[in-house]
Image (cartoon, grey):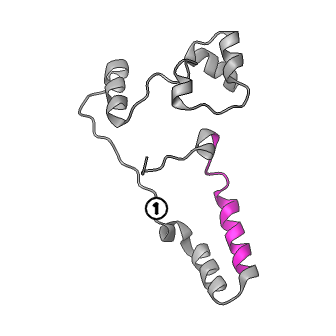
Amino acid sequence: WFKNLVRERRNLDEAELAKVSDGRVFTARQGVPLKLVDLIGGQREAIDWLVANKGIAKDMPVREWKKKSSLERLGLVGAAAGVARFAGLDSIAGLLEKSILLERSGELDGLLAIWQHSAAN
């Protein structure tokens, strides 16, 4: 299913698809000649591309999504794990932390699970 989607949306023939569908992860620079990436750039280039190719208004506002702080993401279970660890109850803290990881395991998928953007880059 996914390979067919890539073939159709990126207009790849069978040989081109075979080159890019063996499980490797490509950089943006590698992706351009492989027809997986249109352009390399930042926010300005992305906006210009959307204006030129998708008819998006140039002055459309861009929403900045911020990650929640560690404390916000911990929630009640995370706080309980922290208290348990502080109290020397490492096994209970570990179980609570594992339950958080299990709950969040469905949050990441696809490329996001391999690469997460760093604001520093």
The image quarter in which residue 87 lies? bottom right
SS under mark 1: loop
Side of 60 where 116 appears, left or right: right
Tell me the residue at 62%/86% (across/down): 86
Picture coordinates of residue 47, whole percent (x, y): 33, 30
Residue occupying the far bottom of the picture: 87
- The amino acid at mark 1 is Lys
Q: 114 or 65: nearer the eye?
A: 114
Residue range corresponding to the magenta coloring? 92-110
Q: Is residue 105 magenta?
A: yes
Q: In this view, does 63 lie above or below 58?
A: below
Q: Which residue is disc 1 drawn over?
A: 68
Tell me the residue at 43%/24% (across/down): 39
Side of 64 where 17 appears, left or right: right
Side of 62 where 38 appears, left or right: right
Q: 20 or 101: nearer the eye?
A: 20
Tell me the residue at 60%/80% (across/down): 82
